[in-house]
Image (spheres, rainbow, N blue to C red):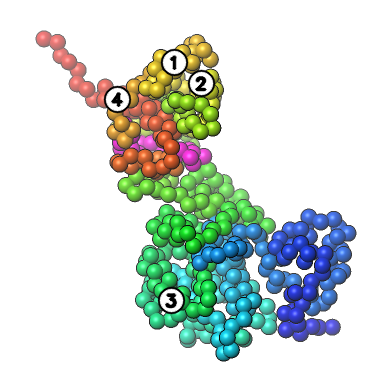
């Protein structure tokens, strides 16, 4: 026996009470974790029409980050890694707006803007993609694509028109009560297009926009996220692993896990570089290494914390190795580890620093003593009386010390291993104006001391001409 597709609408609100009492959200997760008896009961209670409706009840199947947040918002940003299910979330949100629970005035219908970087990307991803609007729509509510007019038309009269970031002016004139914006962070004319869209969102009682994007450090995305009318959901690629090829996950994790690019593209984290930063995400990523050379020296940089407890600054502990044989122009360094600790007692950070030395075979501990003076050396020698320490005093400001080290990076002389995310975040907030992050850049200070010891001071001695006796 067959059931007409239009019967699905009447069954969406008439599913078995065993799970509707719990709410639609995460229904599939609940059923998947339930006992076999409960699963069998659930399936046996479904009528044929209900079985046909079930695949299209997105609240039942969706992951948490794919469902719009509750409350008053104008913009919902779905921020996630590659393959995290962002496109599906946007397509289903459009479907919910079009099929809508809110009644419209007689003769009115929804007007939706579909905005992507190019027409091809809107058509092939947002409209016809595997997770696009047409693929997500039930047979009785599937829209028709009118190629000549670049729009989708639903059986109930709703219309979604295509617009692109290459033509912001195309958003002048039309008006909408909803918009789906895809990959905002990669648009070259993002701010201009976004601004024009805001002027066009003027229909209905509560015009809203859904933004689905992998994060990038661009001004338009940062402004949208900072708006008080914006709410955000977030998920890494791994959250949608059940719907991704295992070989894809293995490959991208092997290549990019533990890198800043991986944090952006897989973890969906917005990595912010301060304007005029001494280091940039792109440059750090370009200098990533996997194979390590044979080092001539390895040192640990230490920037002790002035206090203890959860509210105290971190104690920066950074391990760096260097190859310094041959001409100075051939010298290279690799940042090997960030062993920074927070809230540790003096004995605690001293043990952590010495443990880092032992683990990486470092020959010296370079410790700033401005805050603790002789106490720093005394604390370290209580842990290991024979530890080789070089005490350094900061006679210059943090920026002045960091600038020659940043120059080494610009020359391609310093590389990073994977997994230095927090250190690199601090580095990308160091500017000529100072540190533009929260707290103190203790990890950067430790890095700077280590590279001064390995590269800058020895190079200065190497270049200094010998004094000839008369």
Say the numbered circle drawn on residue 395. 4
Mark identifier at residue 180:
none
* Dot 2 or dot 3, earlier in sequence: 3
Residue 435 found in image quarter: top left
| Residues rendered magenta in the picture | 401-424
Of mark 2 and mark 4, the one earlier in the sequence is 2
Observer able to see residue 70: yes
Give the mark, 1 or 2, whose residue is nearer the N terminus.
2
Nearest the eye: 278 or 379: 379
Q: Is residue 423 magenta?
A: yes
In this view, the residue farthest toward the left is 470
Q: Please tell me whether residue 261 belongs to the stretch shown in magenta.
A: no
Relative to residue 335, is residue 72 depicted above or below? below
Specify few, some or many for label 1: CA neighbours under 10 Å numbering under 14, 14-19, or 20 or more. Answer: few
What's the CA distance linking mark 2 and mark 3? 59 Å
Can I make out residue 295 in this image?
no
Residue at position x 76%, y 62% from top?
22
Sequence order check, earlier mark of 1 and 4 = 1
CB-based contact (under 8 Å), mark 2 and mark 3? no
Q: Is residue 273 left or right of residue 354?
A: left
- In this orientation, which residue lies closer to the viewer: 110 or 95? 110
Circle 2 residue? 346
* Residue 216 position by quadrant: bottom left
């Amino acid at each position: 026996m067959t059931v007409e597709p239009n019967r699905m609408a009447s069954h969406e609100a008439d599913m078995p009470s065993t799970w509707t009492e719990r709410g639609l959200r995460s229904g599939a997760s609940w059923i998947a974790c339930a006992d076999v008896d409960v699963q069998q009961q659930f399936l046996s209670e479904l009528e044929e029409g209900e079985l046909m409706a079930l695949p299209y009840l997105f609240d039942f199947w969706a992951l948490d980050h794919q469902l719009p947040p509750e409350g008053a918002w104008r913009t919902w940003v779905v921020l996630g890694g590659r393959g995290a299910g962002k496109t599906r979330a946007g397509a289903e949100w459009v479907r919910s707006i079009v099929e809508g629970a809110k009644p419209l005035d007689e003769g009115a219908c929804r007007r939706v803007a579909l905005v992507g970087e190019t027409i091809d990307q809107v058509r092939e991803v947002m409209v016809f993609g595997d997770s696009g609007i047409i693929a997500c729509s039930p047979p009785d509510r599937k829209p028709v694509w009118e190629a000549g007019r670049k729009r989708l038309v639903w059986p109930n009269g709703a219309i979604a028109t295509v617009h692109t970031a290459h033509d912001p002016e195309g958003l002048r004139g039309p008006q909408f009560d909803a918009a789906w914006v895809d990959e905002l962070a990669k648009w070259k004319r993002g701010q201009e297009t976004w601004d024009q869209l805001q002027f066009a969102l003027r229909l209905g009682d509560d015009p809203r926009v859904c933004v689905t994007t992998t994060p990038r450090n661009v001004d338009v995305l940062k402004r949208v996220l900072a708006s008080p009318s914006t709410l955000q959901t977030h998920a890494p690629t791994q959250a949608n692993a059940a719907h991704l090829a295992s070989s894809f996950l293995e490959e991208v994790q092997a290549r990019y896990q533990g890198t800043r690019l991986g944090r952006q593209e897989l973890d969906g984290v917005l990595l912010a570089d301060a304007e005029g930063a001494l280091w940039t995400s792109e440059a750090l990523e370009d200098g990533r290494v996997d194979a390590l050379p044979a080092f001539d020296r390895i040192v640990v940089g230490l920037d002790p914390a002035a206090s203890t407890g959860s509210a105290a600054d971190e104690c920066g502990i950074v391990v760096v190795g260097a190859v310094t044989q041959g001409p100075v122009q051939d010298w290279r360094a690799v940042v090997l580890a960030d062993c920074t600790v927070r809230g540790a007692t003096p004995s605690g950070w001293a043990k952590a620093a010495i443990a880092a030395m032992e683990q990486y075979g470092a020959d010296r501990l370079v410790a700033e003593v401005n805050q603790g003076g002789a106490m720093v050396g005394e604390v370290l020698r209580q842990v290991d009386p024979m530890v080789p320490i070089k005490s350094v005093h900061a006679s210059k400001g943090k920026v002045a010390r960091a600038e020659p080290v940043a120059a080494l990076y610009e020359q391609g002389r310093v590389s990073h291993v994977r997994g230095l995310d927090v250190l690199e975040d601090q580095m990308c907030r160091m500017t000529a104006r100072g540190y533009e992050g929260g707290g103190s850049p203790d990890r950067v200070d430790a890095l700077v001391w280590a590279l001064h010891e390995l590269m800058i001071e020895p190079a200065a001695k190497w270049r200094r001409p010998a004094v000839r006796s008369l």
